[in-house]
Amino acid sequence: LRPGAAEPADGLLQVEQELRLRSIADLEQEAAAQEAAEQWELAVETYDEILAIDSTLAFASRGRRNAQQMVDLYQQIDAFIAEPDQLSSPTVAQRATSLLIDMTRMPEIGPRLADQRDELSRLLKRASTPVAVTLLSDDKTAVSIYKVGRLGTFESREIELKPGTYVAVGIRPGFRDVRREFRVGPELDLDPVVVICEEPI
């Protein structure tokens, strides 16, 4: 009726603003549900959607930062759990222990993260518990184990090693050197490790 009147544009703007606010509220609820379910990767994506609508929203920036920190935390824990033998290394064990200490300072954690924490704690205990290993030789081959030291010659010897992968080397003048790689772990059925130089040069 009145071309150029501001009211229609204002009305459309209000509708657009209402739809925008409703979309943000729906996404905020979705992010909260994902956080409660410890679905942190999805929460990061949801907060990204909110920030794409309005990059100035403090709650979304704060939520995304927290969700990304949780994603990073899970990735660190998963890396330790995926390679439990590396926890026998003092430097790696120290990093894992520091991570566990940081987790105990968190105000609250969900059941999924609690399970990961308990598993990492168990693996740290496993890594620090030596396992008896029997070595067999011929009393003529000089035996060494990398990162452990020289054991000399013997027919049978039992040593305690932390869980991990080791390489035993046998040396005897006039014979070809031998290498035996073996893995140690409390859950493994360990056969005696035989290190004998038998092939003349």
Image: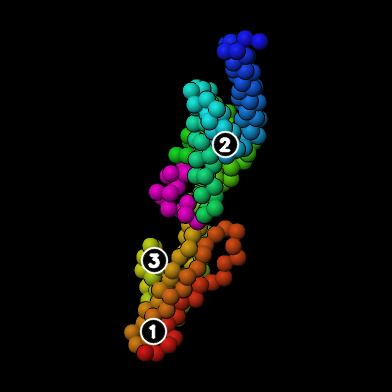
Q: Is residue 135 visible?
A: no
Between discs 3 and 1, the one toward the N terminus:
3
Report which residue position mark 3 lands on.
Answer: 146
Residue 17 placement: quadrant:
top right
Q: Is residue 72 above or below residue 16?
A: below
User: Measuring 52% from the left and 53% from the top, which residue is drawn there?
Assistant: 84
Disc 3/disc 1 C-alpha distance (Å) = 18 Å
Q: Amino acid at mark 2?
A: Glu
Image quarter of the N terminus: top right
Between discs 1 and 2, the one toward the N terminus:
2
User: Measuring 50% from the left and 35% from the top, which residue is drawn there?
Assistant: 69
Q: Is residue 50 visible?
A: yes
- Disc 3 on helix, strand or loop? loop
Image quarter of the C terminus: bottom left
- Disc 2 on helix, strand or loop? helix
Instruction: Determine if the magenta segment contains residue 2.
Output: no
Q: Which residues are magenta?
A: 85-97
